[in-house]
Image (cartoon, rainbow, N blue to C red):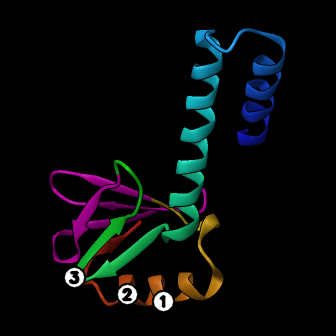
Amino acid sequence: MTILWLIFVVFNLISNDFGEWTAYTWLGISVMYIAIYSFDYFNQYLTIQNNVIKENHLFGKKINLNEIKRIKKFAGDYILQTDKTELTINTQIIDQNSLTELNAELEKLNVEWT
Protein backbone atom coordinates (compact mmCIF):
# COMPACT_ATOMS: atom_id res chain seq x y z
CA MET A 1 0.00 0.00 0.00
CA THR A 2 2.85 2.36 0.78
CA ILE A 3 4.35 1.97 -2.68
CA LEU A 4 0.93 2.57 -4.24
CA TRP A 5 0.42 5.81 -2.31
CA LEU A 6 3.94 6.98 -3.16
CA ILE A 7 3.23 6.34 -6.86
CA PHE A 8 0.09 8.47 -6.56
CA VAL A 9 2.12 11.27 -4.93
CA VAL A 10 4.82 11.23 -7.61
CA PHE A 11 2.26 11.08 -10.42
CA ASN A 12 0.28 13.95 -8.91
CA LEU A 13 3.37 16.10 -8.41
CA ILE A 14 4.51 15.50 -12.00
CA SER A 15 1.14 16.06 -13.65
CA ASN A 16 -0.35 18.79 -11.46
CA ASP A 17 0.59 21.98 -9.69
CA PHE A 18 2.64 21.56 -6.52
CA GLY A 19 0.00 23.51 -4.62
CA GLU A 20 -2.69 20.83 -4.98
CA TRP A 21 -3.97 19.62 -1.62
CA THR A 22 -4.39 16.04 -2.88
CA ALA A 23 -0.62 15.65 -3.31
CA TYR A 24 -0.08 16.54 0.33
CA THR A 25 -2.90 14.23 1.40
CA TRP A 26 -1.38 11.30 -0.51
CA LEU A 27 2.04 12.16 0.85
CA GLY A 28 0.62 12.15 4.37
CA ILE A 29 -1.07 8.80 3.81
CA SER A 30 2.12 7.22 2.45
CA VAL A 31 4.16 8.58 5.38
CA MET A 32 1.54 7.16 7.76
CA TYR A 33 1.80 3.72 6.12
CA ILE A 34 5.61 3.84 6.36
CA ALA A 35 5.38 4.76 10.06
CA ILE A 36 2.93 1.95 10.84
CA TYR A 37 5.01 -0.59 8.93
CA SER A 38 8.21 0.55 10.65
CA PHE A 39 6.64 0.37 14.09
CA ASP A 40 5.29 -3.14 13.45
CA TYR A 41 8.59 -4.30 11.95
CA PHE A 42 10.78 -3.12 14.83
CA ASN A 43 8.39 -4.01 17.69
CA GLN A 44 7.16 -7.46 18.52
CA TYR A 45 3.45 -8.18 18.37
CA LEU A 46 3.23 -9.26 21.99
CA THR A 47 5.42 -9.06 25.09
CA ILE A 48 5.25 -10.52 28.57
CA GLN A 49 7.16 -8.54 31.19
CA ASN A 50 6.68 -8.01 34.91
CA ASN A 51 3.65 -10.32 35.01
CA VAL A 52 1.88 -8.23 32.32
CA ILE A 53 1.01 -9.36 28.79
CA LYS A 54 0.84 -6.48 26.32
CA GLU A 55 0.05 -5.96 22.64
CA ASN A 56 2.61 -3.66 21.09
CA HIS A 57 0.68 -1.40 18.77
CA LEU A 58 -0.87 2.03 18.96
CA PHE A 59 -3.98 1.10 20.93
CA GLY A 60 -2.71 -2.23 22.27
CA LYS A 61 -4.24 -3.68 25.39
CA LYS A 62 -2.40 -5.01 28.40
CA ILE A 63 -3.54 -7.42 31.06
CA ASN A 64 -1.98 -8.54 34.31
CA LEU A 65 -1.45 -12.28 34.15
CA ASN A 66 -2.82 -12.75 37.66
CA GLU A 67 -6.15 -11.13 36.63
CA ILE A 68 -6.87 -13.63 33.83
CA LYS A 69 -9.91 -15.77 34.67
CA ARG A 70 -10.46 -17.69 31.45
CA ILE A 71 -8.62 -18.52 28.23
CA LYS A 72 -10.60 -19.44 25.13
CA LYS A 73 -9.17 -20.99 21.99
CA PHE A 74 -11.19 -19.89 18.97
CA ALA A 75 -10.20 -20.18 15.29
CA GLY A 76 -6.50 -20.31 16.15
CA ASP A 77 -6.69 -17.28 18.44
CA TYR A 78 -6.40 -17.06 22.21
CA ILE A 79 -8.94 -14.90 23.98
CA LEU A 80 -7.74 -13.94 27.45
CA GLN A 81 -10.59 -12.80 29.67
CA THR A 82 -10.58 -10.94 32.96
CA ASP A 83 -13.56 -9.63 34.89
CA LYS A 84 -13.35 -6.30 33.05
CA THR A 85 -11.57 -6.79 29.73
CA GLU A 86 -10.63 -9.19 26.98
CA LEU A 87 -7.43 -9.57 24.94
CA THR A 88 -7.42 -11.49 21.66
CA ILE A 89 -4.07 -12.90 20.54
CA ASN A 90 -3.66 -13.86 16.89
CA THR A 91 -1.41 -16.92 17.14
CA GLN A 92 -0.92 -17.16 13.38
CA ILE A 93 1.40 -14.14 13.26
CA ILE A 94 3.56 -15.28 16.17
CA ASP A 95 6.84 -17.10 15.49
CA GLN A 96 6.61 -20.81 16.37
CA ASN A 97 9.31 -20.58 19.06
CA SER A 98 7.62 -17.55 20.62
CA LEU A 99 4.27 -19.34 20.49
CA THR A 100 5.77 -22.23 22.43
CA GLU A 101 7.00 -19.78 25.07
CA LEU A 102 3.57 -18.09 25.18
CA ASN A 103 1.86 -21.45 25.66
CA ALA A 104 4.26 -22.31 28.50
CA GLU A 105 3.51 -18.99 30.24
CA LEU A 106 -0.24 -19.39 29.84
CA GLU A 107 -0.19 -22.98 31.07
CA LYS A 108 1.46 -21.81 34.30
CA LEU A 109 -1.72 -19.88 35.09
CA ASN A 110 -4.39 -21.62 37.13
CA VAL A 111 -7.30 -20.65 34.86
CA GLU A 112 -10.14 -22.26 32.97
CA TRP A 113 -9.37 -23.23 29.34
CA THR A 114 -12.28 -23.54 26.92
Rate crowding at label 2 as few (under 14), some (14 to 19) or many (20 or more) other CA atoms within 10 Å: few
Q: In this view of the protein, which residue sits in the foreground, 89 or 57? A: 57
Q: Secondary structure at mark 2?
A: helix
Res 51 label: 3
Q: Is residue 76 left or right of residue 1?
A: left
The amino acid at mark 2 is Glu
Q: Alpha-carbon distance for marks 2 and 1?
A: 6 Å
Q: Secondary structure at mark 3?
A: loop
What residue sits right under mark 1 in the picture? 101
What residue sits right under mark 2 in the picture? 105
Residue at 33% x, 80% y is: 48
Query: Up-down: is 19 above or below 38?
Result: above
Residue at 84% x, 13% y is: 15
Mark 2 or 3: in front is 3
Q: Kindly indicate whether the residue at mark 1 contacts the one at mark 2 (C-beta within 8 angstroms).
A: yes
Residue at 72% x, 9% y is: 17
Percent position of residue 58, x then y: 38, 50
Q: Alpha-carbon distance for marks 3 and 1?
A: 14 Å
The amino acid at mark 3 is Asn
Part of the protein shown in magenta: 60-88
Q: Quadrant of residue 76?
A: bottom right
Q: In this view of the protein, which residue sits in the foreground, 31 or 81? A: 31
Q: Quadrant of residue 50?
A: bottom left
Picture quarter with the N terminus: top right
Residue 54 among magenta residues: no
Q: Secondary structure at mark 1?
A: helix
Query: Up-down: is 113 above or below 49?
Result: above
Query: Up-down: is 48 above or below 9?
Result: below
The amino acid at mark 1 is Glu
